[in-house]
Image (tube, rainbow, N blue to C red):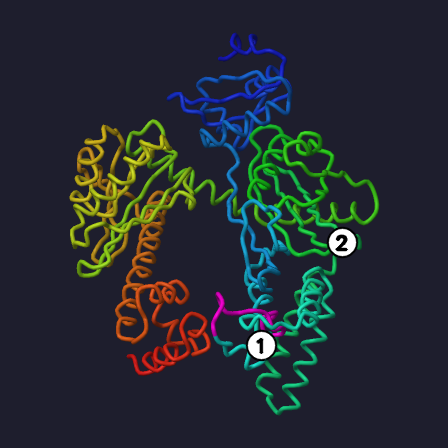
Amino acid sequence: MFKEKLSLVPNLPGSYQMRNSDGIIIYVGKAKNLHRRLSSYFNRTQTGKTKKMVSEIADFTYIVAGSELEAFVLELNLIKEFNPKYNILLKDDKSYPYIEYISKPYPRVKVSRYLHIKKKENKKLFGPYPNAYAARRIVTLLNRIYPLKKCEGSKKELCLYYHIHECLGYCSKKLNKEKLEEMEKEILSFLNGNDKILTNRMQKKMQEYSDALNFEMALEMKKELDYIKIIMDKQKVELHDFVNRDVIGFFFDKGYISVQIFFLRNGKMVGGKAEIFPVISELSDDLDYYIVNFYNKHEIPKEILVSEEVNQEILEELLNTKFVVPTRGPKKKLLEMANINGKINLENELELIKKDEYATESANEELKQLLGLSYLNRIDLFDNSNLFGNFSVSGMVVFKNGRPSKKDYRKFKVQVDKNDDYHTMQEVIYRRYSRMMLEKSEIPDLIIVDGGITQINACKEILQDLHLSIMVCGLRKNDHHRTSDLVRGDTYEVLEINKTSNLFHYLTRMQDEVHRYTINYHRTIRSKGSISSVLDNVNGIGEKRKKELIKRFGSVAKMKEASIENFSEILPLDVAKNLFLFLKDFK
C-alpha cells in the first residue's frame, strides 16, 4: 500500500518514524539506507513483534541525516521525545550501587548510587554491585573491622565509638597519620580485589574474641568471614590487568534477543545483567540502541568487549570509550561465556515471556475494544487512602503497553486532610494534569479511578475544566475487597467481564498495584506522624532533631530496636539516654 511513497524514499542515511491511524508515532528507527530499510518492512513476510507493529502502520515519515552517526543521534532524541510503543524499554532503569570511599575531611565508606559516574573530588568508587545486599554488608563489615568515622558532623566530645576502639578520634583533630594511611591503604587494596588483607584481619579479630571467651562474637565474625569467601569465590573469573571492563554477549532466536553483560572491575568479575527483548528492526540496530540506552544509566567502563555485529565506530563516538572485538585468548573466552549465558537465558525464559506477553497484550487489546478506544498505550490509575480523616494521601500508577512504568508513578499528600474521597480525587486530578499540560508531557489514553460513580464524576469535572478529553472508568471492589466491576465513565454502564479472563486478571493486577503503592505511602506518612508525636514527649528533642531522627529511623519500631550509641550519632549523649529509656517503656 506504500509502493508509490516508498519509491520516493532516498538511498541515504536517516531516521524513520512509523505512525498508526491516529498519527501517533509507534516506532522510531535509524538506517544507513532509508529506502532499503523501509522497503524491507513491507516487501517481506514478518513474524512476531515486527508483524504486529507493521499491522498497525498507517503511514511513515523520515528525516534524512548526514551520516549513520547523525541518524543514530536523531533516533535517540526522537525516542526520548515520543516514547514510541514498540521501541525497546529497559525493564530496570535503576543505577547499580557502588561502594564509595571518601578520604577527606575524614575517611568513610558508604553505599552510593550514581546515574552518571563522574570523577568526584576526594571520592573513589568501587563496583558496580548488582547485589545491593552484598554492597551494604561489605560496608558494615569494613566499619566493624576498621576505625573509620561513623558519626555525622564534628562533635565537641569524643563519641562512644572512640572509647570502644572503633574510631581514631576524628573529632579531636589529634589523629595518628601513620595509622590513618595504613588503614586507607588496606581498605583500598581490599576494594581493588586483594581479599587476603581483610580475611587476615577478620581471622585475627575472631581469634581475639575467642581468647577473650567472647564466643558469640567469634561465631558472628566467622559467619562474616565465610560470607566474604563466598563473594570472592564468585569473582574467580578474572583478567590480570586490573582494567575495568564490561563484556556484552547475546543470543538471537525466534525474533527475540537475549543480552548478557558481565561486569569486570580491576580484572575481577563482580556481577552481571541479563535482559531479553524482541527485535523489531535489524538485529545490529536494536543491539546498538540497547547498549547506548543501557550506558545512559550506568557506569561506562574503560573497555567493552563485544561481537562483530556491534557497530564499534558509532558506539565509541557516542559513549567515548573503547569497544573491542576479541579474536583469541581469555577475552575471547569471556565473550563466548557471555554468549552461552545469553543462549541459556533465552532457552529457559522464552516460552514464559511469550505467554506473559500474549496474556498482557491480549488483555490490553480486549480492554481497548470493550471501551471503543482507537488507541490504548498509557493507563493512569488513582487510589486514595486515609485513616479517620488523618494523613490523607493519593497514589498514581502508570501502565504502558500493559506493563507498569514505575518511573511515572506519583505520590500525592493531600493539602487538606479530610475524609472526603470526592474532593481528594478532584485535588489530585487537577494537580497531576494541570502540571502535565504545563510541562507538555504524555497524556494518558485512559484514566481508571478506584471506586464508582462518585470518583468518576470528581475526575470528569476537573478534566472538563482543563478541557481534556480522556476516557474515565472506575474499578469497584466487592464486600471482600476484591476487584468486582468496571464502570464506564461516559454511560455509567457496569461492564460484565468474565472473572477467568485475561482482562479480569489484568484489571485486578492494576487495581492491586495502585492500592499497594498508595497504602505503602500512607503507612510511611502515618508512621512519621506517629514518630513525631512520640518524640514530643522527650526532653531535649526539638524540631531539627526530630526531623533528623525521622529521616534516620523512619518508624517507632525501628527506633525501639536502636541503641544509645545509634541515637548518640544524632543527639547529645544525655538526650540519647533519655530517648532510649523512654522508648524502652513505650507501649
Residue 513, position as x, y percentages in the image? 36, 51
Residue 442 drawn at (x, y percent): 37, 33
Q: Secondary structure at mark 2?
A: loop
User: Is the magenta region chiefly helix, strand or loop?
Assistant: loop
Give amino acid for label 1: Glu
522 on left or right of 211: left
Q: Which residues are magenta?
A: 141-156
Q: Is residue 205 left or right of residue 462?
A: right
The structure residue drawn at horizontal position 63% and vertical position 52%, both measured from the top left corner, is 272
Q: What residue sits right under mark 1 in the picture?
A: 166
Q: Are marks 2 and 1 in contact (CB under 8 Å)?
A: no
In the image, residue 9 sits, relative to residue 372, either above or below, namely above
Residue 152 in the magenta stretch? The answer is yes
Q: How many marks?
A: 2
Mark 2: which amino acid?
Phe
Q: Residue at x 41, y 40 (%)?
A: 402
Which numbered marker is on residue 125? none
The image shows residue 152, relative to residue 563, as above or below, that is: above
Q: On the image, numbered disc 2 is attached to which residue? A: 242
Looking at the picture, tell me which residue is in the foreground, 245 or 274.
245
> Which dot, 2 or 1, sits closer to the camera?
1
Residue located at (33% from left, 40% from top)? 380
Give the vertical position of 72 relative to 142 (above or below).
above
Q: Earlier in the sequence, mark 2 or mark 1?
A: 1
* Of the pair 475 and 455, the residue shown nearer to us: 455
Relative placement, left or right, of 519 versus 205 is left
x then y, percent, for residue 161: 53, 77
Residue 124, position as x, y percentages in the image: 63, 55
Residue at the spot 70% in from the left edge and 55% down from the top edge = 269
